[in-house]
Amino acid sequence: MVSLDDAVIARLKKGEEHFEILVDPYEAADVIEGKDKDIMQILAIDAVFKDAKKGTHATSESIQKHFGTDEISEIAKKIILKGDIQLTTEQRQKMQKNKRNRIIESICRNAMDPKTKAPHPRQRIELAMDEAGIHIDPFKPVRDQVKTTIETLRTIIPISIDQVRISVKIPAEQIGKSYGVVRNFGVLEREDWQSDGTWIGIIRIAAGMQTEFYDKLNDVTKGNVSTKILK
């Protein structure tokens, strides 16, 4: 369980009544993201309060009335998912910075410039987000914020979430080390083995992973590889 010193209040209002729990804010954020967590381990106290600061517990009657159960873990999860979590300024800034990085990483990995079919550099995404004044919600799931962020970024830079199909040709002497690299990067749509042992395949990957894919492939083949983006 989290210590009282590190815990914050999560509050849910139902009618005229308030229900509060003391939680680890970072673990609670993971629960909101959909990660599997032991709810009891992220509570500071296994109790539901009417007023956590005063230490006033919610009555069992009101809990049963509004939640239909007296299981602390079930109640706490509902409060985390549907209620408000109070953060210190330091906690909020730390969580926003972490989530911003995850959003940028997701965009860089999956997005591209639809005109050039090339991924956007991280710095270009960061600068565009700054210019757009995009607000990061520390508790809203990354996947949801990636979608809204890209919609906003489209007013500043050409950007789209897409996948690209790449034709890859690897000579027989290099296929041993590179075949696994190709398969692990995306979906292998087609492959053919030539009479001389040359391997030709078509792989579909996230648009933003192109640079990483080419770098890795060139490294394991020592540059002895041919690639082409297909329409």
Image (tube, rainbow, N blue to C red):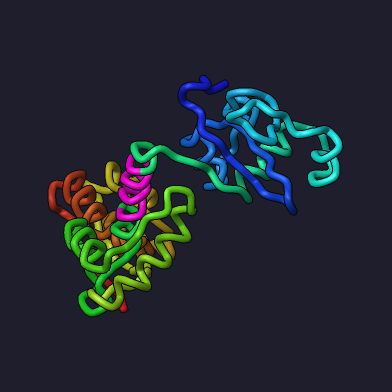
From the viewer's perspective, is 61 left or right of 76?
Answer: right
Residue 27, percent from left and from top: 51, 34
Task: Indicate whether 28 appears above or below 139.
Answer: above
- Is residue 222 among what the camera can see? yes
* Furthest residue toward left: 223
For the residue pair 228 and 50, the one nearer the viewer reads as 50
Residue 162, percent from left and from top: 37, 70
The main secondary structure of the magenta stretch is helix
Q: Residue at x 59, y 38 (%)?
A: 36
- Is residue 227 among what the camera can see? no
Q: Residue at x 31, y 45 (%)?
A: 97
Residue range highlighted in magenta:
93-104
Q: Quadrant of the N terminus?
A: top right
Classify residue 134 by image quadrant: bottom left
From the viewer's perspective, is 62 left or right of 83?
Answer: right
- Label total for image: 0
Task: Indicate whether 133 appears above or below 231.
Answer: above
From the viewer's perspective, is 116 left or right of 25?
Answer: left
Classify residue 157 by image quadrant: bottom left
Residue 203, percent from left and from top: 36, 62
For the residue pair 139 and 156, the one nearer the viewer reads as 139
Q: Residue at x 29, y 43 (%)?
A: 176
Task: Indicate whether 50 appears above or below 163.
Answer: above
For the residue pair 31 and 109, the one nearer the viewer reads as 31
Would residue 190 be counted in the magenta stretch?
no
Q: Residue at x 38, y 37 (%)?
A: 91
